[in-house]
Image: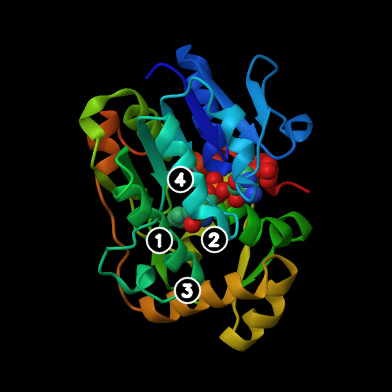
Amino acid sequence: MNRALIIGGTGTVGRQVVVQLSNSGAQFRVMARNPEGARLPRQVEVVRGDLTHPETLDACLDDVDTVFLVWVAPPATVAPVLERIAKRARRIIFLSAPLKTPHPLFQQPNPGRDLGTKIESLIEGSGLQWTFLRPGMFAANATIWWGPQIRAGSIVRWPYLEVSAAPIDPRDIADVAVRAMTEDSHVGAEYVMTGPESLSHRQQISIIGKALGRKLQIEEISPPEAQRELLTIMPGPVIKMLMDAWAAASGQPAVVTSTVEQIKGAPARTFLDWAGDHAADFQA
Ligand SMILES: NC(=O)c1ccc[n+]([C@@H]2O[C@H](COP(=O)([O-])OP(=O)(O)OC[C@H]3O[C@@H](n4cnc5c(N)ncnc54)[C@H](OP(=O)(O)O)[C@@H]3O)[C@@H](O)[C@H]2O)c1
């Protein structure tokens, strides 16, 4: 890799990719819609660009051979953006999801899935060297899901308390991403990545309590109650996507893979590791 472009470098995973590339001394720049608000280290080059305005990618792609792509923008400009990337770069690492894993948690129809499938198919036909990262649930979702209740008190109300996932630390996703950017052996790979253990929602909330040294009271709420109460933290379509996935995954153990350990050569971080390092996010 000579020079990389990070698209989504201000987000949960992209920010960790930026940290790791900075530590390695690699040449890269970050594309951001608002460079002034990016809150990245001063030495990081941040260039204005927006996936919904494909022409803005041209300056960002100057001299770039490798792209790390996160796509949370609307789908309309996927094709012209990927055409521009394919004209300038040689390799793309796309942050996708376990779209092909036969587990009900990952197989419910939703617009995000359709978008991911479309992006992957365009990348496959683009002539770019590609790697698809397919992480399961992010550990960092816990900050959005339970942060407000834990900061406000000791009661956590949540649906589907016995449904399990194997939350993955975004730093582990970034570890694999950076290897895929810098090593040739990952071209054409689709990495289904998870954290090291299957944990129910109830267990995840208890682990956060343990990391904080607090006893949290966990109360199960019904799906209709959750549809109403979760609107304070997530948009309706995201709640629907999650509720459908959790309903379908009830009673099933989570998918757990050893991909992170195999690629990093070190164990994947545990949810307790993640919670301990993010305890401040749960403190009032
Ligand atoms: N959460 C999970 O459990 C999970 C699991 C598997 C896969 N995923 C996938 O992971 C992806 C999300 O990753 P993340 O959590 O790291 O994202 P994130 O924290 O939501 O960050 C999104 C990034 O995209 C940038 N962005 C948004 N709109 C943009 C636009 N129009 N042009 C350019 N940049 C734009 C944002 O930058 P600014 O806002 O600063 O401009 C930000 O850097 C999604 O595709 C999701 O499907 C998530």
Label 1 or label 4, whichever lies nearer to me, is 4
User: Marks 4 and 2, how far apart in space?
Assistant: 12 Å
User: Marks 1 and 2, how far apart in space?
Assistant: 9 Å
In this figure, which residue is indicated by the disc labeled 1? 118
Q: Disc 4 residue type?
A: Leu
Give the mark, 1 or 2, whose residue is nearer the N terminus: 2
What secondary structure is marked by label 3? loop
Q: Disc 1 residue type?
A: Lys
Label 3 or label 1, whichever lies nearer to me, is 1
In this figure, which residue is indicated by the disc labeled 3? 110
Give the mark, 3 or 2, whose residue is nearer the N terminus: 2
Q: Residue lying at the far top in this picture: please name it.
A: 25
- Residue at position x 44%, y 81% in the image: 247
Tag of residue 82: 4
User: Marks 3 and 2, how far apart in space?
Assistant: 13 Å
Give the mark, 4 or 3, whose residue is nearer the N terminus: 4
> Vertically, is 10 above or below 5?
below
Give the mark, 3 or 1, whose residue is nearer the N terminus: 3
